[in-house]
Image (spheres, grey):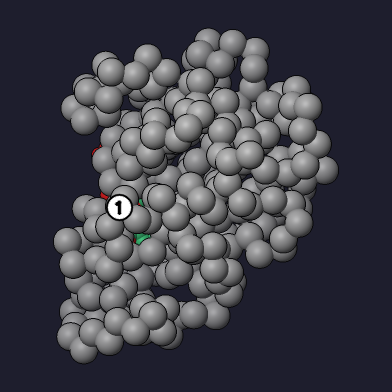
């Protein structure tokens, strides 16, 4: 049937992978009827606004996922766009991590990339970001990343759950898939406990590992309500976060992610996958 969710909401849609998701959703044979592209500063989101000017199904909405109190009124705004139809797909994509937080090369040195054959020998992990190692860790950095990477996705999923349930109930389809009702969380291989061979990156690793646990919990709790939940590692991608030397283009990463979304169903227990659909160890 292919990927064709009717109503979709993406966080952090003004640049990077979020913006690329918007672009590629619009290129699907059956693009969403309503694509709620959220970002924290719509007034500065030129690329996204340009797209919205050409596609009336794209609605640019203000949403700072770290401002959890705004989740009280936000669902009413969502409802005004989806008009009683429910929200088929929520993609928790926003992330406040900066390249300096990840470190110039720690990502490149992760076991995952080495396994992929990227044998980068520039071992500057030690200087990657002193703040991200236990002795230099700042509480503020932890708070910022937990606010965006885990508290945001938990509380936003909770706030929008009635609309996601509505989409599941009103569908004639009884299986679990991204067309009917789903929550997809953008995770990272750096969240994998099994794959952690370098340490460091406390705010990022711990907040994304918590996101993985959230995903697993929601997967177990919501499947009986017809809602599919899984998390995805987009690869090491050329975005502001991934940097220009990253291994994968945005185009390739998101094309892979949409393909995974089109195939993911309730029959697999592998719900932590990469953009090629490969199962990743928790
Ligand atoms: P970018 O840094 O390029 O983009 C991050 C996006 O999140 C921006 O749109 C940014 O908006 C938004 N954002 C940040 N804070 C908030 C907030 N408080 N509220 C709403 N939006 C916010 O990241 P990527 O596109 O590379 O990453 C997308 C996802 O993929 C993330 O979850 C990331 O962890 C994951 N990922 C990426 C990898 C990579 O190599 N790129 C590797 C593994 C995982 P603003 O412009 O306002 O700052």
Identify the residue position indicated by label 1 in the image: 250
Q: Quadrant of residue 128?
A: bottom left
Does any atom of ligand 1 lie closer than 8 Å to the CB of label 1? yes
Q: Is residue 239 visible?
A: yes
Label 1 neighbour load within 10 Å: few <14, some 14-19, many 20+: many
Query: Does 9 sit left or right of 158 as displayed?
Result: left
Residue 29 x, y percent position in the rendering: 48, 32
* Number of numbered discs overlaid on the protein picture: 1
Question: Is the residue 184 above or below the residue 233 in the image?
Answer: above
Q: Position of residue 95 (x, y in %)?
A: 36, 49
Residue closest to the eye, 9 or 40: 9
Tell me: 223 left or right of 188.
right
| Residue at 28% across, 76% down | 108
Against 259, is 167 above or below? above
Give whichever of 73, 105 is nearer the camera.
105
**Can residue 42 be seen in the rendering of this structure?**
no
Q: Using the rendered view, name the quadrant where residue 273 is placed.
A: bottom right
| 262 versus 8 height, above or below | below
Q: Give coordinates of residue 262: x percent, y percent.
A: 58, 46
Q: Quadrant of the N terminus?
A: top right
The x and y percentages for residue 115 are 41, 84
Name the quadrant of the C terminus. Answer: bottom right
Q: Residue at x 28, y 18 (%)?
A: 54
Q: Secondary structure at mark 1?
A: helix
């Amino acid at each position: 049937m292919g990927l064709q969710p009717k109503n979709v909401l993406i966080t952090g849609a003004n640049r990077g992978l979020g913006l690329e998701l918007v672009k590629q959703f619009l290129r699907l044979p059956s693009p969403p009827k309503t694509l709620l592209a959220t970002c924290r500063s719509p007034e500065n989101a030129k690329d996204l606004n340009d797209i919205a000017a050409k596609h009336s199904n794209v609605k640019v909405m203000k949403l700072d996922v770290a401002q959890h109190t705004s989740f009280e009124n936000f669902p009413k705004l969502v409802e005004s766009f989806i008009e009683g139809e429910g929200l088929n797909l929520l993609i928790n994509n926003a992330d406040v991590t900066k390249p300096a937080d990840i470190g110039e090369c720690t990502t490149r040195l992760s076991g995952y990339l080495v396994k992929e054959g990227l044998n980068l020998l520039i071992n500057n992990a030690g200087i990657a970001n002193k703040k991200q190692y236990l002795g230099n860790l700042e509480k503020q950095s932890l708070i910022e990343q937990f606010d965006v990477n885990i508290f945001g996705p938990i509380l936003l999923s909770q706030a929008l759950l009635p609309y996601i349930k509505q989409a599941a109930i009103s569908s004639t389809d009884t299986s679990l898939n991204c067309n009917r009702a789903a929550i997809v969380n953008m995770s990272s291989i750096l969240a994998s406990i099994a794959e952690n061979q370098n340490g460091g990156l406390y705010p990022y690793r711990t907040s994304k590992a918590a996101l993985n646990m959230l995903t697993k919990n929601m997967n177990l709790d919501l499947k009986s309500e017809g809602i599919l939940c899984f998390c995805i590692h987009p690869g090491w991608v050329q975005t502001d976060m991934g940097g220009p030397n990253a291994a994968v283009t945005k185009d390739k990463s998101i094309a892979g992610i949409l393909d995974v979304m089109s195939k993911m169903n309730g029959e697999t227990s592998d719900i932590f996958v990469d953009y090629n659909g490969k199962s990743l160890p928790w």
